[in-house]
Amino acid sequence: MKNFLFSKVGNLELANPVMIASGVCGFAEENLSVLNRLGAVVFKTVTLQPTKGNPTPRVTDFSYGMLNSIGLENPGVDGIKSKLGHIKKLKCKKIASFLGNNEQEFVTIVEKLQEYKVFDGYELNLSCPNVAKGEWFYDIYKLKKLLVRIRKIVSKPLIAKLSPETDVVKISSLCKTLGYDGVTLTNTYTGIAVDYKNLTFKLGNIYGGFSGPAIKPLVQRWVYEVAKKVKIDIIGCGGIISGEDAIEYFLLGAKAVQIGSGYFRNPQLPVECVEFIRKYLQEKKVNLQQIVGLLTK
Ligand SMILES: Cc1cc2nc3c(=O)[nH]c(=O)nc-3n(C[C@H](O)[C@H](O)[C@H](O)COP(=O)(O)O)c2cc1C
């Protein structure tokens, strides 16, 4: 029962199945007592050039979730060089997330990221709802060309992160065929929030990405369908605020989970999830692999 929390997403080996999702943890995050006890951290998506992000306000909270329009604010792929020392020291697996405005930009970014030699894997962001230029992801032919090219370049584990507003099963199947290690399901849903008192919108960008507890059943539907129809490893991501939520994702077929907005509400949440999963498996006298996909076999 020694390694009963161990999980493997393609060739990405994880000491435990809990990860932090992209965008909620800084490149120089100091919360080491939490990060070092996780399977992996996915860093904020990097773009080729530094990106300022969207106009403020950029975040609005609900009891059932949050809407953000950060818009990929990041220092650019060269700008993270100064953070590499910190990233290197982390004991968990370190995953870089990246997004380009076109195929060539994706290639340039990931080549630079690989030169840094600190990342254990890469998450191809096919899904940011806050970047208008990302619309070409919805063209399956362009997408396939991109996926083929990036897979050829990246030797380490490569995950694709999908938008829930695309044909998730079809794209997951394409990723499987092209040798991707796994898919992260999913990013946020596009939403808007109205400020009825001031007769305006709550976000400066009008549109934002909706995340948190309310999206869990919607994302779980995708995990269920992909697990049933495509034999690709899945990382479940959407609405996790407790260890119970994580277990649900495993039962549906996810081999790991990512925690996004739940980390803002409770920075201890990821380790609380690890401990919950540990206890659950110990009580049931099974290892993680024995519960993955129990509801989708
Ligand atoms: C403030 C914020 C910023 C985010 N930035 C990114 C990002 O840079 N790249 C990305 O792939 N996903 C980003 N996401 C999406 C999360 O990684 C995650 O997919 C989504 O929030 C759903 O998970 P959750 O319900 O646990 O929050 C962001 C989410 C939030 C709340």
Image (cartoon, rainbow, N blue to C red):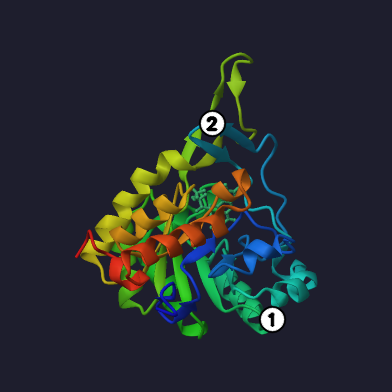
Give the image location of residue 35, x and y in percent: 63, 65
Q: Name the residue rendered at 40%, 51% in the picture.
A: 244
**Which is more toward the observer, 64 or 72?**
64
Along the horizontal axis of the image, is 213 left or right of 204?
Answer: left
Classify mark 1: residues with Cα within 10 Å, few (<14), some (14-19) or many (20+).
Answer: few
Along the horizontal axis of the image, is 242 left or right of 51?
Answer: left
Is residue 57 among the parts visible in the rendering?
yes
Residue found at the far right of this picture: 82
Residue found at the far top of this picture: 197
Q: Is residue 235 above or below residue 197?
A: below
Along the horizontal axis of the image, is 173 left or right of 237?
Answer: left
Q: In this view, does 20 lie above or below 123?
A: above
Which of the numbered marks, if any, corresponds to residue 62?
2
Q: Name the residue rendered at 54%, 73% in the picture.
A: 122
Per the image, label 2 sits on a secondary structure element best described as strand
Residue annotated with mark 1: 116
